[in-house]
Image (spheres, helix red, strand yellow):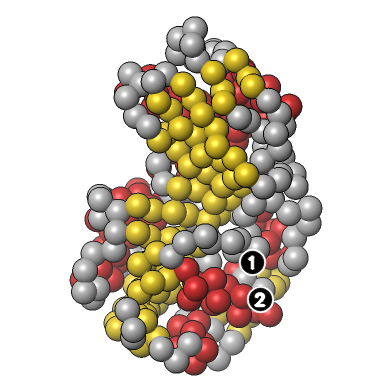
Amino acid sequence: MNRVKLTKESKVLGCGDRGFSSVLGEVTGAEVLGFEPVSEMRIVAENNRLQLLSSSIWNRAPGRSFLIGLLTLAYKKILKSKGKISVVIRYRILFMTKFKTDQEKFWAEEFGTDYIGRNQDPALLAANLKMFSDVFASCKSSPTNILELGANIGMNVKSLQLLAPGSEVTAVEINSDACSQLAKTGCNVIQGSILEVDIPNTFDFVFTKGVLIHINPEELGRVYDVMYKSSSRYIMIAEYYNPSPVGVIYRGIPNRLFKRDFAGEMLDKFTDLRLVDYGFCYHRGNFAQDDITWFLLEKSNA
């Protein structure tokens, strides 16, 4: 790999463990100062210096290829801006020693990586633009602070950035290979399980799309809590709808896809939520989606 060097003054101020530090040196050629384990990092570039602000502890190191991709992207942005930007990228790592459910492990490992190749069709971006434009039309104002749970490589994020270019988007994703591509969108990335993630602030628009259907049904209450607590106003659920819970064989594998009335369960669980609008995206229609039904909910006290 070719090193990207800034100036002889370039330094890394704060870093991760020795393996992480070696990646920094490989990518940047910069001087490394210290080896403090971290789980949260914010890469800041200012005056030709890369700063890594960190806290907490890594339970397990992320993939080397992911770190190389992330840091290479950061340095490319620094060079392009000629050192004039202050914040390059923000990324939080939330790793566990083991996953709580089989479904988490399924998406974090090989199957989740293979899914990336099926999730890059330009037609999907166009369909997402249509769907989100319909959803935003029912909002009283365009969201400026957005959280997606289960973002994969960021096809939804890209649509949101086009529809609401001034908005700040944060995305949670469990698969490290998907995160390496997700980071390229420029959104704030949180790598980890939705069941374990700690969202430190609130967002005026929180959503899932094709994600709740893959959550272990016994853990849905936890995800509903995360969505509700992290939203200051709107919650959007875009999933496969069924009036009663049912399991579906997914690509020949049982217990990997579940249909139900996710929005109805949230309305029952949180009495201050109200249904604003809903819609259906037919697989044979213009801007086709995979028969997804979306529901827009709003906190009544917002």
Residue 278 is situated, as x and y percent measured from the top left of the image, at 32, 81
Please report the residue visible at 63 percent of the width from the left and 30 percent of the height from the top.
15
The mark that comes first in sequence, 2 or 1, is 1
At label 1, counting other C-alpha atoms closer than 10 Å, the crowd grade (few under 14, some 14-19, many 20 or more) is: many
Residue 42 image position (x, y, % from top left): 51, 39
**Towards the viewer: 282 or 21:** 21
Q: Residue at x 47, y 54 (%)?
A: 171
Label number found at residue 156 = none
Q: Callout 2, which amino acid? A: Glu
Kindly give the residue lying farthest to the top in the view shown.
8
Above or below residue 269? Residue 112 is above
Of residues 133 and 97, the one drawn nearer to the viewer in this rendering: 97
**Residue 249 visible to the viewer:** no
Left or right side of 46 for 179: right
Query: In the image, residue 39 lies at what x, y percent?
Result: 65, 45
* Apparent side of residue 255 relative to residue 13 in the rendered image (left or right): right
Residue that badge 2 annotates:
219
Q: Are marks 2 and 1 in contact (CB under 8 Å)?
A: yes
In the rendered image, which residue does mark 1 sit on?
A: 195
Q: Is residue 39 left or right of 10 when viewed as pictured? A: right
Badge 1 marks a residue whose secondary structure is: loop
Graded by Cα atoms within 10 Å as few (under 14), some (14 to 19) or many (20 or more), the crowding at tag 2 reads some
x and y percentages locating residue 22 in the rendered image? 68, 22
